[in-house]
Each structure stands twice: as C-alpha cells, then as structure tokens.
Amino acid sequence: MANRTSAAQRPNGSTQGKICQFKLVLLGESAVGKSSLVLRFVKGQFHEYQESTIGAAFLTQTVCLDDTTVKFEIWDTAGQERYHSLAPMYYRGAQAAIVVYDITNQDTFARAKTWVKELQRQASPNIVIALAGNKQDLANKRMVEYEEAQAHAEENGLLFMETSAKTAMNVNDIFLAIAKKLPKNEQTTGPGGSGQGRRLVEGDSGAKAAGNCCK
Amino acid sequence: MEDNHEEVLEIFCQDGVQILTAPAAYISQLNNVGTLMIVEYPNSNVTRCIEWKPIDLTIDSDVQDQEWTVVSTVRRRRTYSGSLPVDANRSKHLKINMSDIKSFRVARKNQKLTFRDGKGDDLCTFVFQHGSCEGLVAVLKGILKTFVSRRDKHVYCILDDERNPERQQLDKSFAELNLFQEQSSPYVWKLVKNFQNRPYETTMEAFSKITDIVYRGAEHRLMDPEVHNILHRSLEAIENNTTTHSHEEYEVIAHVPKLPALKEYPRGRPLSLEQWKALQDSEGQVEDVDAVKLVIFRGGIASNVRKEVWKYLLDYHRWKYTHSEQANLIKQRNEEYFIMKLQWRSMTKIQEDNFTDYRERKSLIEKDVNRTDRTLDYFAGDNNPNLQVLYDILMTYAMYNFDLGYVQGMSDLLSPILYLMNNEVEAFWCFVGFMNKVSSNFDMDQAGMKEQLQHLNTLTAFYDPEFANYLYKHDSANMFFCFRWLLVWFKRELSQQDAMRLWEVLWTDLPCQNFHLLICVAILDTEKHILMENNYGFTEILKHINDLSGNIDVSAVIGKAEGMYNQIVDAEHLTDAVRIIIGLPILGNASVIDSKEASPDISDLTLNGDTDEVSYENALTNSFL
Ligand SMILES: Nc1nc2c(ncn2[C@@H]2O[C@H](COP(=O)(O)OP(=O)(O)OP(=O)(O)O)[C@@H](O)[C@H]2O)c(=O)[nH]1
Ligand SMILES: [Mg+2]
C-alpha cells in the first residue's frame, strides 16, 4: 500500500488521536472506473470485467493521517444518465466527492465537468471535490490532456490526479489527499452537520477497521 | 462593500421553471424559463421569499445543464456582494414574500403550481418543464403549516394565516393540539383520515404516533372531540390482540391484527418433457395453459424442455397456435429481426456522426456487453463470439424500441436468455417478451421503480408493521436497498441457474401479479432480525442487502413467498391497497378514493394509500442527511 502515513502509526489501529468519519461519493459517466477505483482502494483488487453498478454500493475504508483516523463511508453510484435522478440521494450530505472521467474518452470529461457544476450547486457547500482522470495506464490512447483537466481543476478549486485502478497508480493518494483537505474539527454547520466530519468517541466501532494504513 | 453583503440562505432550488403569470412588474419575464428558489434572509424582517430568476446565460449556457432538473433540499449559504451588478440582475428576479402567500394550487399532474394571496387571487403561476413540483411541494410542506383544502383537493392552504376561513376548523383540532412539533399537520390529517378508513393497513409508524397522541393526549392535552372520536372509534374497531413493547421514550401500545399462520410450501417437480408433450395436442396447441403454468409455478421447468417452454412464456410462441401457424410466425419474426438489424448495420459513418442519440446508445451497449457475465464460460475470454451476438441483439432492440433504447441492466436480463436459446433471433424475441413485462423498470423518470418500491413498502407495512416501522424510523422506508433486486429481477443476487428458475416462476404470473414483490418481502423477512438486532440504518441495510448476493436459497424463498401470499389473501383485514398490488378485485371501500383526494401531489401514485405515501415521501427527504 502506498499510503504515506507518517508519524502516528500505531498498532491495531488503537489511537489516542481523533477519529473522523466522512461520507464520500463517486460520480462520473458509466464505465469510467468508479467501482474499480473503490475496489482498488478498499480491497486492493482489480477486475477486468467489473460489472456495471446497479443502484448503488456502499463500502468503508479507514486511513490514518498523522494523529487522525479517517473513516471513509464510500457511496459508489451507477453512472448511466438514466439513473441520474437518483444521484442527489447519494451525494446529499456528502463531505467529499470524487468525480471520475476516463482519459481515453473526451465525452466522459465533459460529463465530469457537469457533475462538478451540479455538486457545486446542489451538494453541501463545503464539499471537497476531487477530479480523477482514470485509466492512466492507457495513456497511449489519451483523448484528454493532463493540462486541460488540471486547468479545469484549478479554476474550480478541485483536487486533481490522474489515476489507474488497474495499476493502482494514485488511487490511495487521491483518497489521502481528500482526507487531508477535509476539516477535522468538531464544529458543524447547518442542519445535518454537513461539511464537517463527524468525530467519533474513543473506542467507537469506527476505530476498529483501521487496518489498512496502520500496518 | 462589506456592509452591502446580504446573507442569503437557499432552502430550495429547481431549474427549468417557466413563469406563466406574474405580478405586472415582471411582465417582461412572462413565459421565460429560469430557476425557482425558496430563499431565506436571516438578517431581514422579510425572512422568506419565493424567488425566480431567468437562466443566467453566463452560467447556464451549457445545454446539458438545462436539461437536468435537479432538486436540492440542502441548505446553502451564500452571499451576494453589493459591488457586483447585483441590482441589474436582481430586478429581473421575481420575488414574493412568503407571508403574502396564503395558498397554492397544484395542477396538470404536478407540472403547474400557482401561488395565491389571501383574497384567493393568483400571485404567480409556474410551470415545471422538466420533472415536477413535487420537490417544491415537499419543501413547502416542511416549512409551512399546510393542509389540503376541503373544497379543492389540489389546493394547499397555509395555516399561518389568521384570516383563512378553513383555519378555524382546524384550529380546534390538530393545529392547536400542537402534538406534532415537526409541523406536519397535513400528515396528521392524512394519517387520521387514513386511520379512520383503514385502521389495519396503517403502518406501525402510524400506530406509534396515534398511540402517542392517545396516551399523551389523554394525560396532558385537550383534544378536539371530533378527533378524539375518530381515534377512539378506530382503535375500538381493532381486534383485541394487543402487543406491547417499549420504545425509546415512550410505550407504544399497538394493536396488530394477526395474519393467519405462515405455511411454507415445498417446491414441486419441474415440468418434464413428457408432461409438456402430453399437454400439447397433435397439432401442437396447448389446451390447458393454466395447468402448464401451475406446474411451472410449483416446480419450474426441467432443463431439457426449458428452452422450448420459455418461448411460450415470453410470448414468442403462441400457446394456441398449430404447428403451421407457429412456423409462419417464426418465419415472420425472423424476417422482421433481420430488417431491424440491417437498419443499424447499414448506418454510415457520417450518419452516425450526425446522430448523437444513436452514438451514445451504441457506446453504452459496447461498455456493458464487455462486462456482462464474463465469469460465465458462455461469455468468457477475449473475442468470444457470444459477446458479438449479445451486442447485436441489444443494438437491434434499441432500433426495435427506440424510445426505450438501451438502459443499464438490460444486458443482465438478456444474458440468461441468450445462453439458453443460443440463437440470435430466438433470443431477441424472447428478450422482447421479457422487456414487455419489465420495461417500466427502465422509465426515464424512474416512475416504474418508484412505484414498485412504494408497493413493496405497502406490502411490508401490511405483512409486518413492526419491521415497516423499523425501516421508517431508520430512514429506509423508501426501500431503495431493494432497487437492484427489482431492476433486474434478482439477477445479480443469484447464480445464473437460480435466476432462470426464479424468472420462469415469476413469468407464470402465479399465484398473483407482482409476486416478485412478495419474493422481496420473503427475503426481507429472513433478514430483518439481523437488520433490527444490529440497529442498522440505511447505509448498513443497503450494504447488508447487497452482500446477500450469492447467499439466497431460491427454492426456499419461492416457497416462503407463496406461504406469505396465502397468509395475506386469507387475512381478514386485507385492504384495497394490498388487493390492488396483488391484482385482487377491490372491495370499493372509501379508502382508495379517499387516498386520491388527500394526495393531489402524487396523483399518479395514489393507489397505495396515504400513509405509505407520506412515509415514503418523508423517508426520501429524511434519508441521507
Ligand atoms: N485499463 C484500465 N481499465 C480500467 C481502469 N479502471 C476501470 N477499468 C475498466 O473499465 C471498465 C469499467 O469499470 P467500472 O469500475 O465498472 O466503471 P464504473 O464507473 O463503476 O461504471 P458504472 O458502474 O457503470 O457507473 C471495467 O471493464 C474495468 O475493468 C483502469 O484504471 N485502467
Ligand atoms: Mg460501477
């Protein structure tokens, strides 16, 4: 695992530090690799013939960041336009989103931009959005230039990385970058506490799953 | 500059809203399309407004963006800076103080909404070009005290208005009782009316609130005699089988009518080749179709005759046709297929470049064919010729039914059919037959799926009010965790063989229509203990349900669902709402008509009864926050 956790590595995930829980949603055109990114991040696997997602899938993964344990509650959605109307249900209240496109397909990048726009208009105000240009291993078939996507990300204040669920490149990194950017204090804004991580009590079940990074 | 900052809280926002009528000052904006918002100004004395602004071309010129109707109920905070050309922009904004609105009327199947003032005059009318005003109505109901006018069921009156004549009656009843802090008076009203008409069918959620009123009301509150009467009579009407269990802050005393005992039905033997031959006459006609279906329902179809019988179940062959008639039909279907296939095969590159819809469809099919059941031998490996057939059938289907086109999930429905038929034309026509049964699953607006989820909620509430109540309390009454089950008929949960066994049972339409919903109820009944004991919320429930994939015993589930069906039809308190779902003749009591009257907002989904509808709506709004 390429997690770059520094100082606060502790055995068994037991920690005196903070534990934060964040809701993260993956959005993007069908077949860009949303489920594959999650599968890589959560289970370290890649399936060439990953089935399309129907409805939504829910997974969790925990990472350690300095003295904080961050538990991601990940919603993986179905990408096809027909299921667009379900998306607000899943991004509502999310503190982070990864909008994914496929670097070999210009249309998926256009769709990613409109997802970003929708999130900025409709999702929680402080949502941390990351743009992931996936299938970086197919760079020889590239249709979306790195610079173009990066410029878009900069203009819109997004985190940006090119990733590959297949080779695992930047997969953990993008989740970690999000974890770093998420506010980890306890104050909440507005109803539902959107925008902030829920801090769990010491010894809460959230801490048990901290196996991935604290090896 | 700082001083000019005006804090604005956007409570609601919807695009694609046209102004049909408006106050004279906004005449230039009539018929324009824009964004409708509910906005709060916390620092001003005019705290809440309905606002509309035309599409801002600098932001919204993107065509795709206008196509979406995204409804947000998330509060957003933003500030307008005084240094920007705000005034120029804002003068185009139509703005109506919420306090001026005394009622609103919903019309044209939720496409049109009119706000009215205290004199009953129209303030402004909006047309919701994409989607509907349901989201807006839900939010309005959340922030205002509203109730449905007795004179016009499409009119919602706003309670805060002293002068409203309809208020006085209600003043004495629910509003003043102040039982429901969440400002849900229309809910209470619906609930009680519903309860009066259909006490049994009301969900446990309803029970707990009603009993809450009864108990707390009796101790501490004055209760309107009329309300008291309704409640009293309703409760009295219920049998004396009372169960008690404690719940968080208060005791819930619920009267749960008993269903007859569950009797599970063992599966029978599959329809054999010999039986099938015996059921056909010398001309090949099947005399007793019901008998065939009954055998299939009981035990499925033996694998050596399955291919043949599926063609009948899926309307490719006709039960009553003679051999020669059948042969004719087959020939005709064959030609038809190749004509349609040729239509897309002969598409030139230029045609394709100029045909976005087609291109998108093609690309979706390509993507999905590539990842459909690739772990099965039949579709495994690169350049597997069966993938090409799968692709060709789906492309041809997209030409056959261009309105529906291709939607994710369809390749899952085709895969077992193609595997069994192992013939392109036969598989196509059988797939058409299956799609005819389930096409509403793929509706653009998800209406078919929503309706099924709601029906499932109604059935669960009837079969197991306690569990329904649990789901309600855990933001899961929307039943969305069953989405995948319903969309592709358990294809993702079962092995291919088991999916085939289940499908052929469901295609018989025995013992009732919508039996697949009872399959859901049966599986949920097996899982509910785990869900409830672990106090799972929506996310955990969804995860648990998704993870059941591969662990469902299909024979046991079918047998159990049949038993449940019998329990339900034998129940003395069987309601019309349930009768409609399972296709029994309704008794025509007041409940169905009543539910229609009380819910102008979702008029196309009224047959399920108010309570479920309300809880469904609430759950939709409450979930995921
Ligand atoms: N070469 C390559 N292929 C990938 C990568 N990520 C995903 N894929 C492939 O792309 C296809 C689609 O991946 P999914 O993860 O199912 O895509 P999705 O975005 O979840 O799609 P939906 O569920 O339909 O919305 C699969 O065949 C994957 O194997 C990657 O980084 N590189
Ligand atoms: Mg997916």
Image: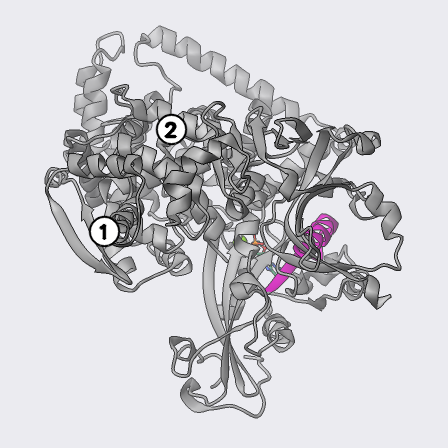
Q: Which residue is rendered at x = 85% and y = 59% of the image?
A: B82
Q: Amino acid at mark 2?
A: Ser
Chain on which label 1 sits: B
| Residue ID for mark 1 | B526
Q: Which quarter of the rendering shows the N terminus of chain A?
A: bottom right
Q: Position of residue B114 (x, y in %)?
A: 63, 30
- In terms of sequence position, does the residue under pointer 2 or pointer 1 come before the other? 1
Q: Position of residue B6 (x, y in %)?
A: 76, 59
Q: Which residue is rendered at x = 42% and y = 80% of the image?
A: A201
Q: Nearer the viewer, residue B601 or A93?
A: B601
Dot 2 falls on a residue whose secondary structure is: helix
| Residue ID for mark 2 | B595
Number of marks present in the image shown? 2
Asked whether mark 2 and ligand 1 are closer than 8 Å, the reply comes as no
Instruction: For label 1, count other residues whose C-alpha is less than 10 Å away and answer few (under 14), some (14-19) or many (20+).
Output: few
- What's the magenta region? A96-119
Where residue A185 is drawn, which disc sits there? Answer: none
The answer to which image quadrant residue B44 occupies is bottom right
Question: Is residue A183 shown left or right of residue B501?
Answer: right
Q: Is residue A104 magenta?
A: yes
Q: Nearer the viewer, residue A161 or B64?
A: B64
